[in-house]
Image (spheres, rainbow, N blue to C red):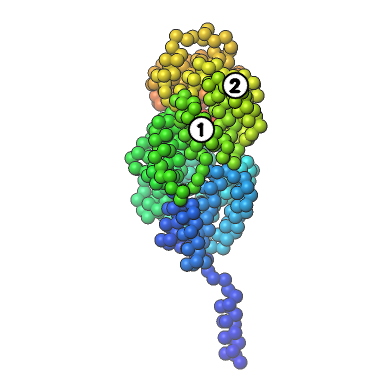
């Protein structure tokens, strides 16, 4: 009887105990991760299904599903899709918490999913939830780095979060401190670089994800645009068959005033339907074209984006560009209809959308000459823009806002052709004329002056102008300009 009782007890334990969860980043999972970080999401999901079938207790496939959902929800901003997939992030987190804490991948994977969740919440306007999830991500990766300091992927996520936290203004740092979150742009980027420049198995495996994050951090928070583009070139990132790299490179090219490069990348990418289909390609291509005043071609892409993108980000901005295109063609009926869409469609979460709405509500059309100069300047066609403005002075414009835009635009143009002395002269005129204006020109002029002095090594003067930029209130692009100025101050102070 005693033997039977022992046998029944053992059998009971065998039947009712849960199989142990594991983190096995095996060959199938690695292949799935590589496919997903090229934006071949369907291929990746098929491999995930295979990995689940091979080992139902492996938790890595659920983390990879989070990556796939993140990219789809981020690029296409489909609110119906978000509603259907929103709860999946929390379900995966709950499942991951059952994993073995003895694995360095346990807290790392939880951090990664919380970052996905927070980023998507920001994209869909759930800012409060995003803040809490960002804090949870930081706590997990900080603890993981303490327990497993030799686990190199910690450096990428921890350094990235530290860099972002380092741009929080001093007046709000007490909030981050309350949550145990500390950051530094300098130290954060140093940590990220250690991983990106590493050559261990993890640095090689995560090359797509780390290159994507690193280039954006360099470009926007370090203000190191040339280095970001140089990194893409030196590392010979695949801009044809990897759509994540192609999008990053084309997006940074557009924002570096290199629209011809952006067009080349977009048009030469692999057109296979294996990749995530997103209207964002039309948006980037439309911008690249309108910046060279290729109005009719630009309209094809801009209107395609407006008609097919289901989200709110950049919707008002794109309708503003469409209204400008029709305005420059002299088609005022279509221009007015597009302006009405600026007011009625999209949201104002992005600074570009906020400015578009402000402009539309004013009911005024821009000066044609200044609008053309602005678009050409935004595309880096500076000689053509300077030719347009040749012979013009402040007195050539009767409206104060046009005079302000004129001196600011000349400042930007001379800045872009490396004539910093002329640029400083016009930028200071813009600050003087627009210090109390709701237009962004004076604040942006102060930011640009700060960057000129920072480049010269005059950090004291740079900080002074960055603070002037931050000190201006109630103007367009305030959020993004303040963020860039704060990043500049942090860099100058070595924080």
Residue 468 place in picture, x, y as percent: 54, 23
Give the number of the disc on residue 332. 2
250 lies left or right of 401: left
- Comparing 94 with 173, the one in front is 94
Image quadrant occupied by the N terminus: bottom right
Task: Where is residue 199? Give x, y as percent.
Answer: 35, 50
Please name the residue shown 50% across and 37% down the image. Answer: 282
Task: Point out residue 171 in the picture as x, y percentages from the top left corner.
Answer: 59, 33
Residue for point 54% across, 51% down: 69
Q: Please indicate whether residue 99 sits to the left or right of residue 453 in the image.
A: right
Furthest residue in direction top, as rendered: 395
Side (left or right) of 218 relative to 127: left
Residue 315 lies in what quarter of the image?
A: top right
What's the distance in space between the residues labelled 2 and 1, CA to CA? Answer: 18 Å
Q: What element carries label 2?
A: helix
Q: In which quarter of the image is residue 121?
A: top right
Task: Write down the residue under mark 1.
Answer: 300
Q: Residue at x 49, y 20 (%)?
A: 372
Q: Front-most of 334 and 485?
A: 334
The answer to the question of whether label 2 and label 1 lie on touching residues, with beta carbons closer than 8 A, is no
- Callout 1 environment at 10 Å: few (<14), some (14 to 19), or many (20+)? some
Q: Above or below — where is 302 with respect to 21?
A: above
Is residue 185 visible to the viewer in this orientation of the structure? no
Residue at 57% x, 9% y: name it: 398
In this rendering, the answer to whether 70 lies above or below 15 is above
Mark 2 surroundings: few (<14), some (14-19) or many (≥20) residues within 10 A = some
Looking at marks 2 and 1 on the same chain, the residue that comes earlier in the sequence is marked by 1
Q: What element carries label 1?
A: helix
> Residue 183 in the image: x percent, y percent?
51, 41
Residue lying at the far bottom in this picture: please name it: 1
Residue 72 vs residue 338, the one in the foreground: 338
* Number of the label disc, if any, that sits on residue 395: none
């Amino acid at each position: 009887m005693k033997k039977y009782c022992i046998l029944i007890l053992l059998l009971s334990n065998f039947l009712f105990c849960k199989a142990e969860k594991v983190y096995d980043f095996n060959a199938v999972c690695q292949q799935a991760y590589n496919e997903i970080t090229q934006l071949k999401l369907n291929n990746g999901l098929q491999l995930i299904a295979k990995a689940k079938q091979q080992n139902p207790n492996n938790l890595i496939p659920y983390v990879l599903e989070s990556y796939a959902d993140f990219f789809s929800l981020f690029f296409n901003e489909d609110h119906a899709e978000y509603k259907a997939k929103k709860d999946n992030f929390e379900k995966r987190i709950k499942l991951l918490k059952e994993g073995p804490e003895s694995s360095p991948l346990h807290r790392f994977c939880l951090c990664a999913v919380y970052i996905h969740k927070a980023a998507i919440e920001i994209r869909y306007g759930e800012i409060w939830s995003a803040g809490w999830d960002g804090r949870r991500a930081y706590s997990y990766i900080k603890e993981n780095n303490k327990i497993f300091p030799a686990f190199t992927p910690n450096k990428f996520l921890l350094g990235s979060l530290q860099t972002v936290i380092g741009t929080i203004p001093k007046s709000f740092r007490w909030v981050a401190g309350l949550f145990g979150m500390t950051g530094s742009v300098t130290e954060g980027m140093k940590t990220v670089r250690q991983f990106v420049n590493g050559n261990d198995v993890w640095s090689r495996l995560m090359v797509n994800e780390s290159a994507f994050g690193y280039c954006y951090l360099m470009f926007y928070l370090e203000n190191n645009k040339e280095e970001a583009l140089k990194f893409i070139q030196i590392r010979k990132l695949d801009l044809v068959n990897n759509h994540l790299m192609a999008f990053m490179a084309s997006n940074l090219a557009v924002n570096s005033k290199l629209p011809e490069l952006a067009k080349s990348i977009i048009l030469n990418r692999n057109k296979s339907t294996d990749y995530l289909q997103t209207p964002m390609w039309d948006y980037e291509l439309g911008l690249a074209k309108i910046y060279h005043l290729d109005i009719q071609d630009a309209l094809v892409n801009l209107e395609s984006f407006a008609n097919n993108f289901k989200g709110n980000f950049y919707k008002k901005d794109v309708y503003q560009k469409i209204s400008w295109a029709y305005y420059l063609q002299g088609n005022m009926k279509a221009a007015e209809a597009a302006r009405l869409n600026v007011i009625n469609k999209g949201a104002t979460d992005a600074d570009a959308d906020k400015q578009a709405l402000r402009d539309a509500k004013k009911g005024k059309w821009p000066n044609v000459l200044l609008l053309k100069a602005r678009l050409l300047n935004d595309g880096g066609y500076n000689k053509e823009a300077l030719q347009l403005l040749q012979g013009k002075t402040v007195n050539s414009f009767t409206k104060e806002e046009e005079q302000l835009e004129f001196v600011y635009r000349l400042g930007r143009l001379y800045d872009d052709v490396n004539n910093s002395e002329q640029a400083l002269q016009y930028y200071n005129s813009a600050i003087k004329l627009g210090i109390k204006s709701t237009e962004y020109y004076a604040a942006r002029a102060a930011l640009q002056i700060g960057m000129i002095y920072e480049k010269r090594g005059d950090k004291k003067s740079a900080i002074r102008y960055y603070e002037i930029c931050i000190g201006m209130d109630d103007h367009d692009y305030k959020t993004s300009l303040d963020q860039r100025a704060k990043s500049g101050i942090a860099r100058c102070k070595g924080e």
